[in-house]
Image (cartoon, grey):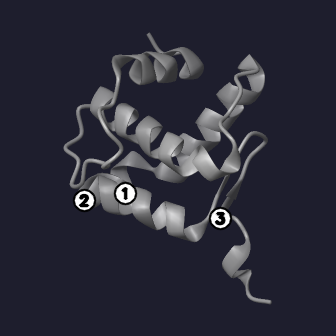
Amino acid sequence: MTGKHRPVFQGQRFSLFDWQLDRLNQMLGRQSESFDVLGFLFDLDAALASSGHIVPPQKQQHEWLEQLVFAEARRRALPIANVPKLGKLSTRMADALTSIMGKK
C-alpha cells in the first residue's frame, strides 16, 4: 500500500489529503506559499479543538475547508487565483471563521 490514502494533515478535528491540499494551493495560486495552508490548518484545528466547534462530516469537509481558506485569504486581502465554485461565500462563514480563530 502506498501513502496515497494517508492524510498530509491529521488534526484533532479533521484531516487533509494530498488532493485536497493540491486544490487549496491551486485556489490560492501565487499566494499559496505566503498563505501557508498547513500552518493555517494547524491553527484552525487547535482553535476548533479548544472551542468545541463541530466540524462537518468527512464527505463535506473539503468544501468547508475551501470556504474557510477563501474567507481567510479575503480577510488577509490576498488576491485569489481561483475562487471556489461553491456558491456565494456568506458573511456568516467569514464571521464563523473569525469566531473560531478568535480574531476580531
Q: Position of residue 93 (x, y in %)?
A: 44, 24
Instruction: For marks 2 and 3, give the CA distance.
Output: 21 Å
Instruction: For marks 2 and 1, give the CA distance.
Output: 7 Å
Q: Mark 1, residues whose alpha carbon is within 10 Å: few (<14), some, or many (≥20)?
A: few
Quadrant, the C terminus: top left
- Disc 2 designates what residue? 30
Residue 33, which numbered label?
A: 1
**What residue is drawn where x is 64% and y is 52%?**
59
Amino acid marked by disc 2: Arg
Taking depth in this image into account, of 73 and 54 the one nearest to the observer is 54
- Disc 3 designates what residue? 8
Residue farthest along the bottom direction in this orientation: 1
Residue farthest along the top direction in this orientation: 104
Instruction: For marks 1 and 3, give the CA distance.
Output: 16 Å
Quadrant, the N terminus: bottom right
- Name the secondary structure under disc 3: loop
- Name the secondary structure under disc 1: helix
**Labels 2 and 3: the sequence-earlier one:** 3
- Name the secondary structure under disc 2: helix
Amino acid marked by disc 3: Val
**What residue is drawn where x is 37% and y is 32%?**
71
Q: Mark 2, residues whose alpha carbon is within 10 Å: few (<14), some, or many (≥20)?
A: some
Q: Mark 3, residues whose alpha carbon is within 10 Å: few (<14), some, or many (≥20)?
A: some
Marks 2 and 1 close (CB-CB < 8 Å): yes
Q: Position of residue 7 (x, y in %)?
A: 69, 65
Is residue 44 left or right of 94 when viewed as pictured? right
